[in-house]
Image (cartoon, helix red, strand yellow):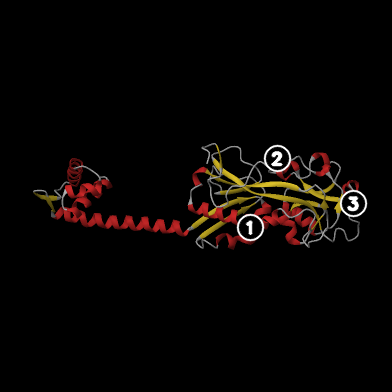
Amino acid sequence: MEWSDIRIFLAVVREGTMTGAMPLLRLDHSTISRRIARLEREAGAQLFDRAGRRLTLTPEGERLRATAEKLESIILQEVLTLASEQERIVGSVRVGTTEEIGAHYLAPRLAALTAAHPGLEIELVAVPRTFSLASREVDIVITLDRPNKGVVRFKRLIDVEFGVYASDRYFADRPVPTTLDELREETWCGPIKELLFTPELDILPASASDDLNVKYRTTSMSVQLGAAMGGNALTVLPCFMADQVGLARLALDDAIFERTYWLVVHEDLAQNSRVRALMNAIETLVQSDRAIFRPSAGVGANGSDVAMLPRVSALTPPWIDRTKETVGDQNTFSRFASVGGHAA
């Protein structure tokens, strides 16, 4: 038995004739007659008494009408409930992010991300690793790696400046370096290159890192932050992360390190209302904070320079030309590029 036959049955009951039901159903008379006959065969009972064109329900037909209308009411109510939930944005969205932007930027702003949609729940996975959208490990990814495979949609979220940071404690008993040679003599905390989940965090390039005194190494930006805050070493950190805890950034002329965060979603989830709502909220929040992601060169957390060093081009990693890639409209998915599927 098909629900479409029940729908035709109810339309005929309400209109009183098959001819009257034709405009509502957009079916011709013979099709309606054939479908009613099929329903009667499947029910094993006559549903209508026929008196000319007018149809009246038999007792069996009346029983079916009552049950069908109850089912119709339940289905319509469920559809309305689902539509209401979609409008209210209810449910959970899991976001996989790099450690620094997840723990040090998004986490303090979770309430802001859900302010417009109180029914939205966020699962924030902020660890130094890659995430699989294909296996539905997460719903949204914020990554430093521009996607180049998979059926995904992505767009540039924000360009971010990294700088060389230290604490006042580090320079309490030593002079601030003013030359490249002096910078090489400082103690550094840097990455364990072979364990990095992305080469984008290899901020100390081979051309310079061999000359630096990298005494401490880690795969964690949080560890680098802690090492700098404890006065143990110089390190390279994203400005939005280091400036908020009062670390001082050395004003290295033309040696601001830049990376790009990408916002990525699987093609199948690109139109999901919860996912769209959270991605729009993330974009809006990040764009409103552009100044902390790309502060003016040489200004530390307290608004003053620590030191202005000469140009240190040897410390600058090889750049990808990002100037030709523009940020899409922050409240739409239409500007997303598509990998492994149709272009958005």
- What residue is pinned by disc 1? 288
User: Of label 1 and label 2, which has the lower sequence position?
Assistant: 1
Task: Identify which amino acid the numbered label 1 is placed on.
Answer: Ser
Image quarter of residue 122: bottom right
- What residue is pinned by disc 2? 321
SS state under label 2: loop
Could you classify mark 2 by the number of other residues whose Cα lies within 10 Å: few (under 14), some (14-19), or many (20 or more)? few
- What residue is pinned by disc 3? 178
Q: How many marks?
A: 3
87 left or right of 47? right
Residue at figure coordinates x 50%, y 54% from the top left: 274
Cα distance between the residues tagged 2 and 3: 29 Å
Task: Identify which amino acid the numbered label 3 is placed on.
Answer: Thr
Q: Quadrant of the N terminus?
A: top left
SS state under label 1: helix
User: Of label 3 and label 1, which has the lower sequence position?
Assistant: 3
Classify 122 as above or below 144: below
User: Of label 2 and label 3, which has the lower sequence position?
Assistant: 3
Could you classify mark 1 by the number of other residues whose Cα lies within 10 Å: few (under 14), some (14-19), or many (20 or more)? few
Could you classify mark 3 by the number of other residues whose Cα lies within 10 Å: few (under 14), some (14-19), or many (20 or more)? some
**Numbered tag placed on residue 102 in the rendering:** none
Residue at figure coordinates x 27%, y 58% from the top left: 70
Cα distance between the residues tagged 1 and 2: 24 Å
SS state under label 3: loop
Residue mark closest to the camera, 3 vs 1: 1
292 left or right of 164? left
138 left or right of 11? right
Q: Are marks 3 and 1 in contact (CB under 8 Å)?
A: no
Task: Identify which amino acid the numbered label 2 is placed on.
Answer: Asp
Q: Position of residue 176 (x, y in %)?
A: 89, 55
Residue mark closest to the camera, 2 vs 3: 2
